[in-house]
Amino acid sequence: MAQMITAQEAAEAMFNMVKEAAGLRKLKPMDLTKNLLELFGDRVDKQICKEAIRELVESGRCVYTYFGGTYLELPHREGAAND
Amino acid sequence: MADKLPPTPKLDELEKGPWPSFVSEIKMAAKSSLASQDLLGLLERSYNEKIGHWKHGGIVGVLGYGGGVIGRYCDLPAEFPNVSHFHTVRVNQPAGWYYKTDALRKICDIWEKRGSGLTNMHGSTGDIILLGTRTDELEPIFAELTAIGFDLGGSGSDVRTPSCCLGKSRCEWACYDTMALTHDLTQSFQDELHRPAFPYKFKFKMSGCPNDCVASVARADISIIGTWRDNIRVNQDAVLEYTKNGLNIQKEVIAFCPGKCMEWDGKQLDIDNSTCRRCMHCINVMPKALRPGKDTGATVLIGSKAPIIEGALLSSVLIPFWKPVAPYTDLKDLMGRIWEIWCEEGKNRERIGEFIQRMGMGNFLETIGVEPIPEMVAHPRENPYVFYEEYLVEDDEEEGQDKN
Ligand code: SF4
Ligand code: SF4
């Protein structure tokens, strides 16, 4: 059986995807999970992806945002925000 | 502070008449809340200009959470600085909406200190809705709410806070314990509630009987509605009592029975329970004479929604009769299978009902491993073409044999 990647490794890969997409397009948690399954094949599963997302938001490296749907983004000042 | 209320001739119109007025409520709050004062001014201006002055923010929660806060900013912050930020906080209500007054006071104390003081008890999701606060108050509000035993509810593409009617706690018609199931699902699906991972929102609503007091059949992705599968219990003496007191059974009960399954000969009420639709009409009219049966449970339905992106949908039957027994593992496993395929194949902002319409109920049932049965059919088919898969397989085999 293939050696599974850790939740930390999955989080790192997801974080890089979010960073690369920043300002270009928004990624939903499910997009990240699907991308990871594609990238790592049977070395990752949905549970690891869940833990990775949790790790990203609880550490504050990524934040959830809502624009018609829920996305994961780098923390940033909202476009609509007032001082 | 009261004399600073802005003139609001248009809003004042909404205080006339016998019904409760949200304008009166905001005015009352404005006596001690600057945000409520500005809200009145901003709303009057919107009514005059016929323009909404709110911007949707992307902020959704507190650290680690993907739901529970709905971000709002005013586009006239210089003129209305006290509603420059006006975020909504959704607080997970207790099942059945029971509170001690002490708990409500504590919530209101937090909200008067850190928000506008305005509440909506309760929102259409069922949550306690706290209206209007600033971004920098969100974390302290969350900390103070959790310290008194409350948590944020759902928002965005997640499981929304499950809600229910008060069921067995007060209602004699409840066919199962709605509050127990709601509490259990809320606890079990904390991850799905706070960390949105779905194509769109997903709502559970539980009603104890077909009266469906939380309107689950019209607005929940999963509606769990109490029902029974044995016979309606009839007290013939009490039926006679109703007629003596002037009830016209033929006109007021039998004429409205959708199952056309009742007969009344002036002395005895007969019900053909095999065609009863469990609609509750007769029971509602003669509550002292009729009661649901004793073999109670629930019907699980799927796919209703209010019209937002596409039109409204009513729920379709998924499990005609289900015995809700804690820890409800069968239901939770089924939810897992439903979410798996919906997350895999669902489009962005596609509710489960729309997804089922797109892929077809037959395909959907096959994917989640549920056998199609007649109770799932809403009405007879309109298309006369019938496709029997198993006959085709047999034919193919026969053809194969012929060839050999
Ligand atoms: S739905 Fe039925 S059980 Fe629940 S409160 Fe209404 S009448 Fe009672
Ligand atoms: S519950 Fe409804 S369908 Fe059944 S007997 Fe009463 S009125 Fe008729």
Image (tube, helix red, strand yellow):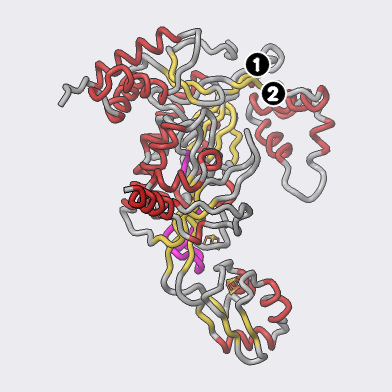
Relative horizontal placement of residue B319, taking residue B266 as reference (left or right): left
Q: Which chain is indicated by disc 2? A: B
Please tell me which residue is depicted at 81% across the width and 48% down the height of the picture: B17
Is-magenta flag for residue B167?
Answer: yes
How many C-alpha atoms fall within 10 Å of the one at disc 1: few (<14), some, or many (≥20)?
some
Magenta: main secondary structure equals loop
**Mark earlier in primary sequence (2, 1):** 2
The magenta segment is B160-179
Q: Which residue is mark 2?
A: B38
Instruction: Work out whether residue B399 or residue B44 is closer to the camera in this orientation and state it.
Output: B399
User: Does residue B121 appear anywhere in the picture?
Assistant: no
Instruction: Work out whether residue B310 or residue B365 is closer to the camera in this orientation and state it.
Output: B365
* Figure quadrant of residue A36: top left
Q: Give the image location of residue B255, x and y in percent.
A: 70, 75
Q: Which chain is indicated by disc 1? A: B
Please tell me which residue is depicted at 69% across the width and 26% down the height of the picture: B39
Please tell me which residue is depicted at 53% across the width and 13% down the height of the picture: A78
Please tell me which residue is depicted at 68% across the width and 71% down the height of the picture: B256
The answer to the question of whether label 2 and label 1 lie on touching residues, with beta carbons closer than 8 A, is yes
Whether residue B286 is situated above or below residue A64 in the rendered picture: below
Whether residue B6 is situated above or below residue B252 in the rendered picture: above
* Pointers 2 and 1 within a single chain: yes
User: Does residue A39 appear anywhere in the picture?
Assistant: yes
